[in-house]
Image (spheres, rainbow, N blue to C red):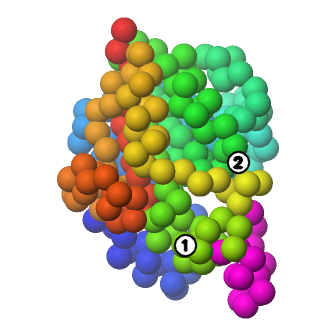
Amino acid sequence: MILHKLIVHHARHGYDHAFSLMQVDDAVRWLRDRGVAMGQGTRALDLGCGSGTFGQRLLEMGCRVTFADESDWLPAEIPRTCFRRINLDTESLESLGRHDLVICSNVLEHLRESERLIRSFPALLAPGGHVYLSWTNWLSPWGGHDFSPWHYLGPRLGPRLFDRLVGKPRALKPFENLFVTHIGRTLRLLRAQRHLELVAVAPRYYTELWSLMKIPVLREVLAWNCAALAARRD
């Protein structure tokens, strides 16, 4: 369980590289515990990579990593030959090829066409490959991101009151770069993919309490972030 560590670190240092690395290392541990191969020769795709913290850790582990996003925010030490520019909402993802491991971390809630992304997963995976999907569901305590917990008043009223009463600048705007997502619907979409098998689901920051994810409605509120692991099955 790392939630308490993340809260303490964020209070002291904000959202810095070390904060991101704490999340990545805990996710890597969870994936290894589920038998996911991450090492020499593993073809990995960091989809919606942002600053590339997850993919960079995989590079250090010996994986052959492709970073993909609509803009290049990668640090200078990552070779630009590893980067592919792509809009996850509008462009075909099949051009990215097939991989043994696809990482899509904290991306889903920022896509207008999240269902389209999920339907693309099988085409991105080599036989026996895995996809790791994590996202902040709307009804979690952090569902509104930089205007949480005002999001509980709704995606329109919440940010409007936040702007009027709190007045802090915010980067995320509902229906523009932040969208309502729910755990139940997303899991149903994953299970509906013909060539995907859902392997494990857990609250990302306290994976030991994975049984919470079996409780509809409550899981939408009790999980700060949902982590799902699926495998390609032909």
Q: Residues within 10 Å of mark 1 (few under 14, many from 20)?
A: some
Q: Is any part of residue 139 visible from this angle?
A: yes
Q: Is residue 139 left or right of 165 when viewed as pictured?
A: left
Q: Does residue 165 lie above or below 206 as drawn?
A: below
Quadrant of res 97: top right
Measured as percent of width and height from the top left, residue 5 is found at 37, 74
Q: Amino acid at mark 1?
A: Tyr
Measured as percent of width and height from the top left, residue 54 is found at 52, 47
Read off the residue under disc 1.
Answer: 152
Magenta stretch, residue numbers: 158-173
Dot 1 lies on which element?
A: helix
> Which quadrant holds the C terminus?
top left
Q: Is any part of residue 168 visible from this angle?
A: no
Q: Residue at x 66, y 65 (%)?
A: 155
Q: Nearer the viewer, residue 179 or 234?
A: 179
Quadrant of res 71: top right
Q: Nearer the viewer, residue 108 or 192?
A: 192
Read off the residue under disc 2.
Answer: 74
Q: Is residue 89 left or right of 198 when viewed as pictured?
A: right
